[in-house]
Image: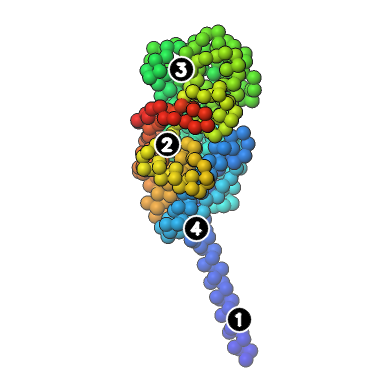
């Protein structure tokens, strides 16, 4: 009897050891088991939280859709989100947590340029494929290295495109630029706009800056008013642009306001009111586009969240689709193989046809939109 009990105990012990061993092997990194973990970091709180929340919602929608179809190569997708508050230091913390604690296989992010740049090199060092949907600062992929991709266009593309549009389509000869000297995004676009506008034969009559946390722009705007430019370029985010536009209007400035993708937020009109009405800016897509890829995305997002998706959402959705497809094509979560698969991809997405150049930057087009109030209208499409 004692022998039988002892044999049973040993059998149970062996079985338990085997089960523990299997479980351990099955959860080594996110490459094993039944779940593929993907990280995302962006501003989910703070002054530009609408950007991060739009991207998060779209990524969650893409996650829901891919899992409804059986996941990736038979494995469910789990996206884990971290808040960086658009702060580079917080972005580093978010990256470390996603990679070291959550063991993600790939990352979608960051959302803002500064936060993305802060972790770009770390992604390549750790061999974690990282795809930013929205960070437009030009040097990010070059500095970050071979594991860093971007599915949006560059800051320089925005500045050059708006300069050509102002000079050729609007027929303007003079421009003023007012930009945030403490932000690489704003500064980079300002520089490329000035260079291209002058190359097109225009004259930049005022090229002025402000600091990151400034709230009063009357000194700069008073000088700009004295030069009476035909267009006023404001390359910054919606929360700043709305304030500048209101102060410009109160000073009697009548220049055509033009801008960049940072304008795109449901809060732009809430902040700026009629002072931003009629302003024109370059953006990644137009939600009223009749293209099938746009319409299906807008319909799905609207059904899921009971609101229309902004450009940040469209970019987030396309980035998720690209990353999911790269993982599917790679048939593994090995970083090098996912990176190689991503580099070869072409996607007909909500923001247009996307492929990657040799620097892992997106090759794609854009749209120029006009602020009609809380909604926009399509003015022009720019092809790559």
Residue that carries the numbered disc 3 in the rendered image: 194
Q: Are marks 2 and 3 in contact (CB under 8 Å)?
A: no
- Between residue 171 and residue 63, name the one nearer to us: 171
Nearer to us: label 4 or label 2: 2
Nearer to us: label 1 or label 3: 3
Q: Residues within 10 Å of mark 2 (few under 14, many from 20)?
A: few
Residue that carries the numbered disc 1 in the rendered image: 9
Which sits earlier in the primary sequence, circle 4 or circle 3? 4
Q: CA distance from mark 2 to mark 1?
A: 68 Å
Q: CA distance from mark 1 to mark 4?
A: 33 Å
Q: Is residue 211 above or below residue 262?
A: above
Residue at 53%, 24% in the rendered image: 276
Q: Are marks 1 and 4 in contact (CB under 8 Å)?
A: no
Which sits earlier in the primary sequence, circle 2 or circle 1? 1
Outermost residue to the top: 226
Residue that carries the numbered disc 4 in the rendered image: 35
Which sits earlier in the primary sequence, circle 4 or circle 2? 4
**Relative horizontal placement of residue 345, taking residue 120 as reference (left or right):** left
Residue that carries the numbered disc 2 in the rendered image: 288
Q: Secondary structure at mark 1?
A: helix
**Relative horizontal placement of residue 347, taking residue 374 as reference (left or right):** left
Q: Residues within 10 Å of mark 1 (few under 14, many from 20)?
A: few
Which sits earlier in the primary sequence, circle 1 or circle 3? 1
Q: Is residue 223 visible?
A: yes
Q: Residues within 10 Å of mark 4 (few under 14, many from 20)?
A: some
Where residue 44 sits, quadrant-wise, is top right
Where residue 223 sits, quadrant-wise, is top right
Q: Secondary structure at mark 2?
A: loop
Q: Are marks 1 and 3 in contact (CB under 8 Å)?
A: no
Q: CA distance from mark 2 to mark 3?
A: 31 Å
Q: Position of residue 125 (x, y in %)?
A: 50, 42
Residue at 44%, 43% in the rendered image: 298
């Amino acid at each position: 009897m004692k022998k039988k009990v002892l044999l049973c105990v040993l059998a149970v012990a062996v079985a338990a050891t085997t089960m523990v061993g299997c479980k351990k092997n099955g959860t080594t990194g996110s490459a094993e088991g039944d779940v593929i973990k993907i990280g995302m970091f962006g501003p989910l709180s703070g002054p530009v939280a609408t950007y991060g929340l739009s991207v998060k919602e779209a990524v969650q929608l893409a996650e829901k859709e891919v899992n409804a179809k059986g996941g990736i190569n038979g494995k469910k997708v789990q996206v884990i989100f971290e808040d960086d508050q658009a702060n580079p230091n917080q972005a580093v913390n978010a990256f470390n947590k996603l990679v070291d604690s959550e063991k993600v296989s790939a990352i979608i992010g960051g959302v803002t340029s500064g936060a993305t740049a802060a972790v770009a090199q770390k992604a390549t060092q750790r061999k974690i494929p990282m795809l930013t949907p929205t960070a437009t600062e030009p040097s990010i992929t070059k500095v970050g290295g071979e594991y860093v991709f971007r599915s949006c266009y560059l800051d320089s593309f925005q500045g050059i495109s708006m300069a050509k549009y102002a000079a050729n389509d609007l027929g303007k000869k003079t421009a003023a630029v007012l930009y945030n000297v403490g932000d690489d995004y704003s500064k980079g676009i300002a520089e490329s706009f000035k260079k291209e506008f002058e190359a097109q034969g225009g004259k930049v009559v005022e090229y002025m800056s402000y600091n990151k946390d400034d709230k009063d722009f009357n000194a700069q705007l008073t000088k700009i008013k004295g030069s009476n430019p035909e267009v006023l370029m404001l390359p910054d985010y919606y929360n700043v642009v709305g304030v500048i536009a209101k102060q410009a209007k109160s000073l009697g400035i009548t220049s055509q306001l033009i801008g960049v993708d940072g304008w795109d937020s449901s809060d732009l009109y809430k902040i700026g009111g009629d002072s931003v009405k009629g302003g024109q800016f370059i953006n990644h897509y137009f939600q009223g586009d009749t293209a099938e890829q746009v319409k299906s995305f807008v319909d799905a997002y609207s059904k899921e969240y009971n609101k229309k998706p902004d450009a940040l959402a469209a970019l987030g959705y396309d980035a998720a689709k690209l990353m999911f497809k790269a993982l599917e094509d790679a048939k593994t979560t090995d970083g090098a193989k996912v990176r190689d698969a991503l580099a070869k991809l072409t996607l007909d997405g909500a923001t247009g046809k996307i492929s990657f150049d040799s620097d892992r930057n997106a090759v794609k087009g854009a749209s120029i939109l006009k602020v009609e109030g809380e909604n926009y209208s399509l003015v022009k499409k720019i092809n790559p």
